[in-house]
């Protein structure tokens, strides 16, 4: 089973979430996402005024694949990789920058926001997010536990679906 390469939870997630919202506010972009190179969405924010985004899972998978293709192109030229990617259409643009070894910050913007502004604030967000990630490295992972009420309600649900063993 594939799992995300970067775990965000607790206080670190809250900090990163706030940094993504700040990025949207300052850059005037529509959406900001952190994805890993496997195509998992690790965190995302949407500007209040922005329309509903396309499928974020599809977007993350396609951007991660595109990043991998660009990495292969960079290696053809003897480069270790390209640190950022820009794609612009008539109305929508996408700016992607390496965030960590296995993650990217994706900023989706429209023609009301200048690419330079998006790049500037995305770069600042990457620096701040990297600090938050390094500070949260030792944060303990959440522990999942199920109490008796959960067990009993789950058992009752399963008994209702499949019948009781009694």
Image: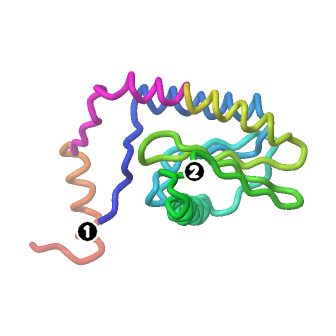
10 Å crowding of disc 1: few (<14), some (14-19), many (20+): few
Q: Is residue 101 left or right of residue 114?
A: left
Q: Position of residue 9 (x, y in %)?
A: 40, 36
Q: CA distance from mark 2 to mark 1?
A: 51 Å
Asked where in the image residue 121 lies, by quadrant, the reply is top right
**Residue most extreme to the bottom:** 162
Q: Position of residue 117 (x, y in %)?
A: 80, 34
Q: Is residue 22 left or right of residue 60?
A: right
Q: Which mark is residue 158?
A: 1
- Name the element at disc 2: loop
Question: What residue sits 20% from the left and 42% below the top?
Answer: 147
- Name the element at disc 1: helix
- For the record, the magenta segment spans 128-146
Q: Position of residue 77 (x, y in %)?
A: 55, 59
Q: Which residue is mark 2?
A: 82
Question: What residue sits 39% from the left and 22% below the top?
Answer: 135
Question: What residue sits 55% from the left and 25% below the top?
Answer: 128
**Label total for image:** 2
Quadrant of the frame with the N terminus: bottom left
Front disc: 2 or 1: 2
Q: Is residue 26 left or right of residue 154?
A: right
Q: Quick check: 69 above or below 146? A: below
Q: Which mark is residue 30?
A: none
Q: Nearer the viewer, residue 98 or 6?
A: 98
Q: Is residue 161 left or right of residue 127?
A: left
Quadrant of the frame with the C terminus: bottom left
Look at the image and say whether residue 132 sits in the magenta stretch.
yes
Look at the image and say whether residue 43 sits in the magenta stretch.
no
User: Of marks 2 and 1, which one's residue comes earlier in the chain?
Assistant: 2
Question: What residue sits 26% from the left and 58% below the top?
Answer: 154
**Residue most extreme to the front:** 78
């Amino acid at each position: 089973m594939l799992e995300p390469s970067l775990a965000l939870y607790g206080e670190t997630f809250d900090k990163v979430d706030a940094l993504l919202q700040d990025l949207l506010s300052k850059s005037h972009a529509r959406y900001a996402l952190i994805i890993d190179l496997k195509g998992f969405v690790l965190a995302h924010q949407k500007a209040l005024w922005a329309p509903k985004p396309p499928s974020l899972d599809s977007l993350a998978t396609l951007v991660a694949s595109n990043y991998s293709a660009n990495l292969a192109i960079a290696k053809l030229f003897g480069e270790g990789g390209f640190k950022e990617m820009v794609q612009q259409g008539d109305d929508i643009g996408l700016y992607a920058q390496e965030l960590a070894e296995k993650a990217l910050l994706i900023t989706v913007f429209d023609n009301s926001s200048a690419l330079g502004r998006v790049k500037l604030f995305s770069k600042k967000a990457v620096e701040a997010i990297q600090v938050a990630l390094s500070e949260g490295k030792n944060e303990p992972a959440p522990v999942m536990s199920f109490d008796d009420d959960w067990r009993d309600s789950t058992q009752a649900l399963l008994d209702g679906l499949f019948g009781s063993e009694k």
